[in-house]
Image: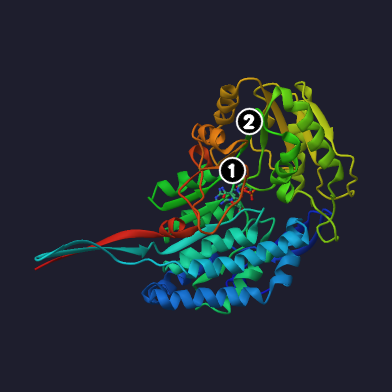
Amino acid sequence: MTTAGTAAHDSRLPVQNPATGEVFDHVPRCTADALAGIVARARDALRDWSRRTEADRRRQLLACGAALSRHVDELAGLLTREQGKPLAGARAEVALAVDWFRHTAALTLATEPLVDEPTAQIVMDRVPYGVVAAIAPSNYPIILAVTKIAPALLAGNTVVLKPSPMTPLSSLLLADILAGVLPPGVLTAVAGDAELGQALVGHPDVALVSFTGSVEVGRAIAGAAAGRFAHTVLELGGNDPCIILPDTDVTQIAEQVFWRAMRNSGQFCAAVKRVYVPQARRHELVEALSSLADKAVVGDGMDAGTQLGPLVSRQLADRVAGLVEDARIHGATVHRAATATRQGGHFHRPTIVSDLPAGTDLELTEQFGPVIPVISYTDLADAVARANATQYGLGASVWGDPGAARAVADELDCGTVWINDHGDLRHDVPFGGTRCSGLGVEYGYWGLLEYTRIKVTSVKG
Ligand code: NAD
């Protein structure tokens, strides 16, 4: 694997296959010296890249998408081996990244006339910040890198990408492919862990940090960037509630709710992470979800037919198991799917947890695994209050009659509420969290604006 900057790298970062727990490859770890050189090259590349026309940068984005489209299978294979997701999902992720370049290239940042008087003309432009640090998480390494790279580049910034140390291979290959299209220094990927991320965020020449990851790391990044007033876009964790209204046929929606919770084995920021169901419907729903859990095919993402792969790390699998066990100790009923899992990998069987007493960690914190806590309510207002009573505010959903659901949606304090759906993210709709789930938005024109600052030019005479 060759990547810009690797010549000066020293020790190696091991990469595990989460389906087996075995280390199957290593990547060069980026050193502090190498990072300084890479950021300096990104800063130098800005001079030319930021002065190009938008039309030229748009052509380059289209070329990036075309280059990526020639490597879908190669990238998807790496993604499955290092992240664990089923191969079909990995292919879909890379295909979405290809499309994302195309969609982003269709956006435009026009100069806006603000004042047009006989003796004064004032216009507003959207100009790039400079060098962007794009720090990505382990769950969707390719698409979550591209949703940063494409708008940052279109706006005229250059980018240093730092993927998760658990999933660096596909991101380094992505950067290699794109480096074949882009001018030198415009995009470079660096591999390393939290220490490298800290060095990148603290670098004086990094003007904007675009981060997707956990609340805890987001908080550390916000603190580090604040000292020098670097702009941040923070897309953080979620603990999305799903509220099922009284009079909703739970057997009809159970399958949709199940898969909106289990996507990528629950490793999805906007997955359903807790379900509030009327007490009278609780039994029916738990039965239906448990039966779906029993039928789900868990296994190595490389095996045909696998629906749910392993969790990305042993640490995450242990954390999820710990949250379920804690709920059980506090009186919850745990239904673990009968499905067999392979020894050695970081697997967690799909699990339905019911009869949760109020305030367990499983209800209040983001679990990020294939677990559905089902919480019953007798008073809808109480369910809404519990849905809002965590530090998170990413997404939420309400299931039932659309009119009645809209009234409940208005009471939910989060970035997106879906009605009769959950977690449907689109290239043309902004996405972001409130409270501890983040700052700013990504996607579409509104996401593009985050990679620009306002510059006003005022002409007299
Ligand atoms: P994580 O926060 O552990 O790591 C994310 C990235 O931050 C990694 O590249 C990591 O190396 C880096 N990092 C760690 N410490 C750092 C520091 N001090 N300074 C700079 N960088 C540092 O997240 P993860 O486990 O990879 O991903 C899962 C989390 O991401 C979940 O909480 C999930 O909800 C969230 N997420 C949010 C969104 C969203 O759009 N809101 C999307 C996907 C994932």
CA neighbours of label 2 inside 10 A, class few (<14), some (14 to 19), many (20+): many
Instruction: State the residue at coordinates (77%, 24%).
Output: 332
Give the quadrant of residue 280. top right
Give the quadrant of residue 164. bottom right
- Relative side of 165 to 265, left or right: left
Relative to 37, does residue 143 appear above or below in the rendering? Answer: above
Where does the C terminus fall, quadrant-wise? Answer: bottom left
CA neighbours of label 1 inside 10 A, class few (<14), some (14 to 19), many (20+): many
What type is the residue that disc 1 sits on?
Gly
- Relative side of 216 to 305, left or right: left
Residue at mark 1 to residue at mark 2: CA–CA distance: 25 Å
What type is the residue that disc 2 sits on?
Leu
Q: Position of residue 415 (x, y in %)?
A: 50, 42
Instruction: State the residue at coordinates (51%, 50%).
Output: 431
Where does the N terminus fall, quadrant-wise? Answer: bottom right
Secondary structure of the residue carrying tag 1 is: loop
Q: Is residue 36 visible?
A: no
Instruction: State the residue at coordinates (31%, 58%).
Output: 454
Q: Name the residue under label 2.
A: 245
Checking the image for residue 237, the label placed there is: 1
Checking the image for residue 293, the label placed there is: none
Q: Which of marks 1 and 2 is in front?
A: 2
Q: For this rendering, which residue is in front, 334 or 405?
A: 405
Q: For this rendering, which residue is in front, 135 or 373?
A: 373
Q: Is residue 269 visible?
A: yes
Q: Earlier in the sequence, mark 1 or mark 2?
A: 1
